[in-house]
Amino acid sequence: MADEPIKDAASAALGALGATGAAAAIGVFLKGLFTGSTGQEAEVRKALQEENRRLRLRAQHALAWQDLCLKARREAEKLGFTGTWPDDPEERDEE
């Protein structure tokens, strides 16, 4: 049961990585068009690596937070909490 939220969080992180990575590549390409430089491969790779590191860190924090929430929920249920839990947040597409 806990596998499904983890898969959802991982797919959201990978989707964000792809979208922001593509935006970084387009930005570097447009910069090259305006400045007239043609050898931008190193710039593109560096920008994508930085974005990849940033998004990987955010994904790790999101997954850790989700894991803590699920553990807290299970512990509360073991202690006899019978209240209702709020719905999980809706995922949004960032296209």
Image (spheres, rainbow, N blue to C red):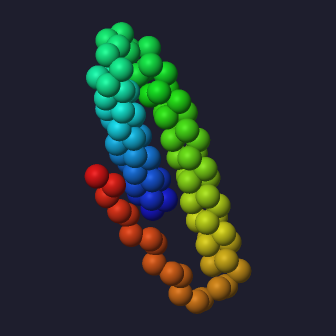
Residue in the foreground of this view, choosing between 31 and 26:
31
Q: Quadrant of residue 15?
A: top left
Question: Residue 36: image x %, image y %?
Answer: 32, 16
Question: Residue 50: image x %, image y %?
Answer: 53, 30
* Residue lying at the far bottom of the rendered structure: 83
Q: Residue drawn at (49%, 34%), measured in percent from left and top?
A: 51
Would residue 94 be seen by someone viewing this image from the given angle?
Answer: yes
Question: Residue 58: image x %, image y %?
Answer: 56, 47
- Looking at the rendered structure, the number of numbered marks drawn on it comes to 0
Quadrant containing the N terminus is bottom left
Would residue 3 be seen by someone viewing this image from the given angle?
Answer: no
Question: Residue 29: image x %, image y %?
Answer: 32, 25
Q: Residue drawn at (58%, 89%), measured in percent from left and top?
A: 83
Q: Residue drawn at (28%, 52%), measured in percent from left and top?
A: 95
Q: Quadrant of residue 31?
A: top left
Residue in the foreground of this view, choosing between 71 and 27:
27
Would residue 9 be found to the left or right of residue 54 on screen? left
